[in-house]
Image (cartoon, helix red, strand yellow):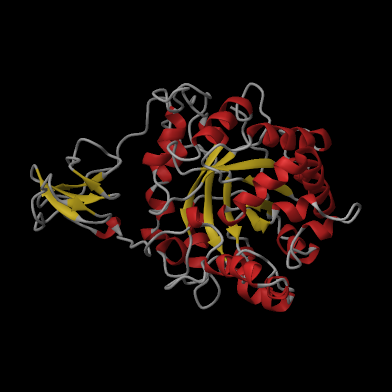
Amino acid sequence: MIKRVLSLGPILFVLGLIVLVGCSLQKEPANPVSQTDVSKIAAADCSHPDWDPAVSYSKNDHVTHNNHEWIAKKNNTNIEPGTNNAYWRDLGVCGGDPPPPPPPPPGCEEPTPIQIFGVWHAGDHYCDWALPIDMNQFDSDNHWLIDRGDGRPSVNLVVLSFLQPLQVLNMSAGDPTTGVPVGMTQDVVNYFKNEGIRVMMSIGGVTYTDYWTQALATNATQFGLNAAAIASYFGVGIEIDYEEGQNPDLIGLQAFVDAYRSVHPYDATGANHAARLTIDLAAGGRYLIDLNRYATINWLDNANPVLDYANAMVARDSGDPADWQEHVDGKPQYGPPIPPKAPNRFTGGLYLKGNLSNCTNFASSEQNEHADYVMNVAPNGAGTTCGMLGYMFWAAGTPSARKNYVSTYPPNSCEGGMGVAATTFDIPIPMPPLRQE
C-alpha cells in the first residue's frame, strides 16, 4: 500500500501516513495499560487513603473504605466501593486475607470451557499487509503462535487484519488474490492452518470505515460475493469490521451478508471454514449502537442464526466484564431497545502488546482475572447456557507506530501469557463446533 501511496500523490500519501499511525483507533488505548497482580496481595493493609467521592480514580488505584481495601478495576468518580463490582474489587478486611472470588450465578456452577482463544494479526506493517512476506522471518516473528513451548499452538484462531473493502469489491474476476493485500498469501494462511489453527480475514477496521460505506453503496451484493470468493480460495472465514457509529448502511450490509450466505450457508458444524462469518461490535452497548441493534436482532439470534458470533472489541481500557455484561443484558432503555445477546454469541476483546501481562505473565493477566466471568456469566433473556465463547486479543504483530507500542515479536513473544493461558484453559485445537445455545 505504501508504495502505491507514494506514487499517487500527496493526498494518498497523507492517507498512507494515517495507516502507519495506527490501523484501528477503537483498538488502541490512549496510554499503555498497567497491570497489578492482585493474586500476590496476601493481606489488605489498608494503608491507602480513604475513598473520597470527589476524587477521580484510575484503574489499579487503591483506597480504604469500610475497613476494607479496594482496587479500582476501571476509571471512576463517585462510585462507592462495595456498590458496583464492575468498578471496585474487594481486597479484603484490613489485616485479613483477600476474600474468595464471588460464587458463580445460580445454574452456572460448572464453568463452560472456553472455545475461542484467538488473536487479530496486524502483520509487521501496521495492518495493511502491504509488503511481501519472507516466511522464514515470519516464522521467527510468530513462532510463539504455533508453539507455546511444548509444540502446541498458543491460540486456536488467527484473524488476518485488514482487507481494504474497495479492493475486495474491485478485485479481478476469477482471481481472489487481487482482493487481498500482497502480504496475505496462501503460505501465511497455511502456516497457521497446518497447525490446526483456524484462520479468518477481517474486512475493514476504523481506518477503512469510509471505504466500507463506499463499497456498500457501489454494489453491496458483488462486495459480498467477492468476499465469499476470497473465503473459498484461501479456505478462511470472513469478519465484518464496519465501525460506522453514525448512520451505518444497514440495507447495504444486509445485502452483503445475503450475498455471502448465498455462497456459504450458515454451518453450525464449523466444518466449512469459509462459512464462518462474524462481526465486530463495540466493547459494550454504548457505541456502534445502530449496528449492534441490527446485528443482535437479525443475525445473532440462536433460533435463526445468520452470523456465527460477534466480537466485543477492546476499548481504550482494554476489555472488561462491565462492558460485556451490556451485551448480555442488552439496552432496554434505548429507543428502540437493543435486545440481550446469548453469551454463546460473542467473545470478549482484550489488549495484547509485548509489554503487557496478557502477553508475558498469565498470573497477572486480564485473561486470568476475567476467566470466572467469561466461563460462568449467566444468560439474561437470550440463550440457555452460561459462559461466553471466549477471548479475542488485539493484536499480534505490529498494529501501530505510536509511541511506546511494543510488538509481540521476539524478544517480547507471548508464550508466558498466551501460551500458559492456552494450557490452563485447555484450549481445544482445532476449534470444535461452537455451542449453539
In the picture, the quarter occupied by the N terminus is bottom right
Horizontal and vertical percent position of residue 261 = 77, 34
**Residue 431 seen in render:** no
Residue 212, above or below 178: above
Kindly indicate the quadrant of the structure image that contains residue 325: top left
Q: Residue at x 65, y 36 (%)?
A: 308
- The residue that appears at 71% across and 33% down in the rendered structure is 268
For the residue pair 432 and 17, the one nearer the viewer reads as 17
Image label count: 0
Q: Residue at x 62, y 54 (%)?
A: 208
Can residue 327 be seen? yes
Residue at the front extreme of this rendering: 10
* Residue 395, position as x, y percentages in the image: 54, 60
Residue farthest right in this picture = 174
> Residue 150 lies in what quarter of the image?
bottom right
**Residue 429 coordinates in the image, percent (x, y):** 65, 51
